[in-house]
Image (spheres, rainbow, N blue to C red):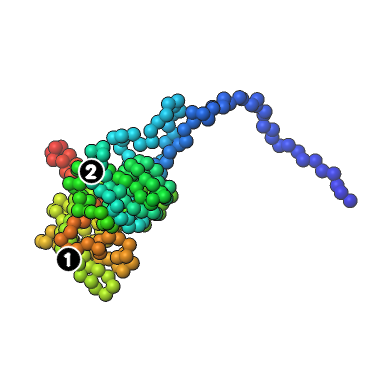
Amino acid sequence: MSLPFRLSVLCKTPKTPLQRIPVLSNRNAIPPKAYLRFNPFSGYSTLTLFVSNPKPRNHPTISHPPNAAIRCLFTGIVEEMGQIKQLGIAEHGGFDMKIGAKTVLEGVNLGDSIAVNGTCLTVTQFDTQLSEFTVGLSPETLRKTSLAELSSGSLVNLERAMQPISRMGGHFVQGHVDGTGEIVSMEPEGDSLWIKVKAAKEVLKYVVPKGFIAVDGTSLTVVDVFDEEACFNFMLVAYTQLKVVIPLKKVGQKVNLEVDILGKYVERILGSKLTGSINSS
């Protein structure tokens, strides 16, 4: 036998009239853009994802306007070795370098950043069918990096700029070469390879044992620093030797060096505090 029952309402929510919400036409809507912001002073994370919502505009825009400060970040994990197909003075008067590659061309767009031997360069042309892309080199880039030593047929390390969903397998690499170093020795030990590099004092002061350094765009761990020789060394395991261009070079050749950016920030902070203390006293 079923028993009748009643559900009592303990409280009532007053009904409010629905307000009309104006609907914006999506004709001028611009999707938010995601960026990577490098924040070495954050107490929670050194890599922050933030989203900007630009205001609607009616006029077309250029994704990467000339002279715009495009921030990019790499990890120092080489994705592939590309081969130089052509380099030299272009018709427009600049210095162009055409590189054969496959992996880094996946999803590539004009204006994207690709690290070539650790140097952040901008894609100016690409052809996925021919598996090649072109980057421009400024006179300053040729002076400050080892790219001037390249020739047709040379192999180079390639890495695309990381995305917000990318895994940080190496360390923070900006693609801003601090200077070049000279290989002074290459000695095998078992299936590994010891490499010693001589560097300028202004670069070597940021190099510490067990710290990070990018050599030709490859994230490596420093083993020892020899201040009296102005050198540091590192070891390449067998797998890494097959994936990067460093073992293909010879003693006396140059490599691009980028030190860990955190060391520069620490130096800057300490220097500012010291200056402030002197001025206050």
Tag of residue 89: 2
Question: In x, y percent, where is residue 150?
Answer: 22, 53
Question: In x, y percent, where is residue 124?
Answer: 33, 42
Numbered disc 1: secondary structure? strand
Q: Residue furthest bottom?
A: 190
Residue 175 or 212: which is nearer the viewer?
A: 175
Res. 270 visible in picture: no
Residue at x 49% of width, y 28% of height? 28
Q: Which residue is mark 1?
A: 185
Asked if disc 2 and disc 1 are in contact, CB closer than 8 Å, the reply is no
Marks 2, 1: nearer the viewer: 2
Q: Amino acid at mark 1?
A: Ser
Relative to 6, is 168 on the left or the right? left
Question: In x, y percent, where is residue 122?
Answer: 31, 43
Residue at x 40% of width, y 31% of height? 61
Residue at x 67% of width, y 29% of height? 14
Numbered disc 2: secondary structure? strand
Disc nearer the start of the sequence (2/1): 2
Q: Relative to residue 146, is residue 124 depicted above or below?
A: above
Q: Separation of disc 2 and disc 1 at Cα?
A: 34 Å
- The quarter of the rendered structure image containing the C terminus is top left
Relative to 18, is 132 on the left or the right? left
Residue 111 or 176: which is nearer the viewer?
A: 111
Q: Residue furthest right?
A: 1
Q: Amino acid at mark 2?
A: Ile
Question: In x, y percent, where is residue 147?
Answer: 22, 51
Residue 63 or 248: which is nearer the viewer?
A: 248
Dot 1 crowding, Cα within 10 Å, few <14, some 14–19, many 20+: some
Res. 134 visible in picture: yes
Residue at x 20% of width, y 46% of height? 142
Relative to 30, is 190 on the left or the right? left
How many marks can you see? 2
